[in-house]
Image (spheres, rainbow, N blue to C red):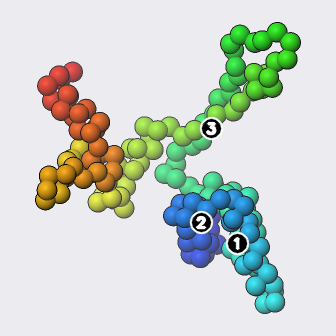
Amino acid sequence: MPYNNRLEFEVADFLYRRNQMSAGDINYLLALWAASLAVHNDAPPFSNTTDMYNTIDSTPLGDVPWESFSLQYNGIRPEGNVPSWMEADYDVWFRDPRTLVHNILSNPDFKSDFDLAPLQEHTADGTHYFCNFMSGNWSWKQAVSLQYHPF
């Protein structure tokens, strides 16, 4: 849900997440796919990027609802020609990051997919090996500083 079959899910996952293909290239690929299937009175899994993005956006993600707020520029405006971006209202959409992280940490599917604590790995010659956020210097320094400065 909301995918009609595994192929739809795999195509969306490949184009959007794994390949991170541009919308223009996705539309081009889907048009080619549609042309090849037209002789069989069939269609590709998505008609275009809007169809695919809407399907992805309607994928349930741990019951964390979308929230939004509006904002607009409230600084000094120039006299005369005021840029349109200074007059516009902007909607910011988000999901609660704390709840999202809680859902990720409590999901057994991700049990071995990320490190919960900072780590340092070194090659045989002593070179620091960086592979993800938790292997970086910043996370290591944060953990070490907390060790010496408890709350």
Q: Say what amino acid the circle numbered 3 marks.
A: Trp
Image: 9 above or below 126: below
User: Quick check: marks 1 and 2 in contact, CB under 8 Å?
Assistant: yes
Residue placed under numbered mark 3 in the picture: 93
Examine the image and state in which quarter residue 72 appears.
Answer: top right
Examine the image and state in which quarter residue 22 appears.
Answer: bottom right
Residue 15 drawn at (x, y percent): 59, 66
Q: Earlier in the sequence, mark 3 or mark 2?
A: 2
Judge depth for marks 3 and 2 and give the one in front: 2
In the rendered view of the protein, which quadrant contains the N terminus?
bottom right
Which secondary structure, mark 1? Answer: helix
Q: Say what amino acid the circle numbered 2 marks.
A: Leu
Q: Earlier in the sequence, mark 1 or mark 3?
A: 1
Residue placed under numbered mark 2 in the picture: 15
Q: Residue furthest bottom?
A: 40
Q: Nearer the viewer, residue 111 or 146?
A: 146
Residue 143 drawn at (x, y percent): 21, 34
Residue 97 is left or right of residue 78, and the answer is left
Residue placed under numbered mark 1 in the picture: 29
In 3D space, how far apart are the residues under numbered discs 1 and 2 (Cα atoms)?
Answer: 10 Å
The residue under the point 13% across, 59% down is 124
Residue 13 drawn at (x, y percent): 55, 65
For label 3, the crowd category at 10 Å Cα-Cα, with few meaning under 14, some 14 to 19 and many 20 or more, is: few
Q: Nearer the viewer, residue 61 or 44?
A: 44
Q: Say what amino acid the circle numbered 1 marks.
A: Leu
In 3D space, how far apart are the residues under numbered discs 1 and 3 (Cα atoms)?
Answer: 29 Å
Tag of residue 138: none
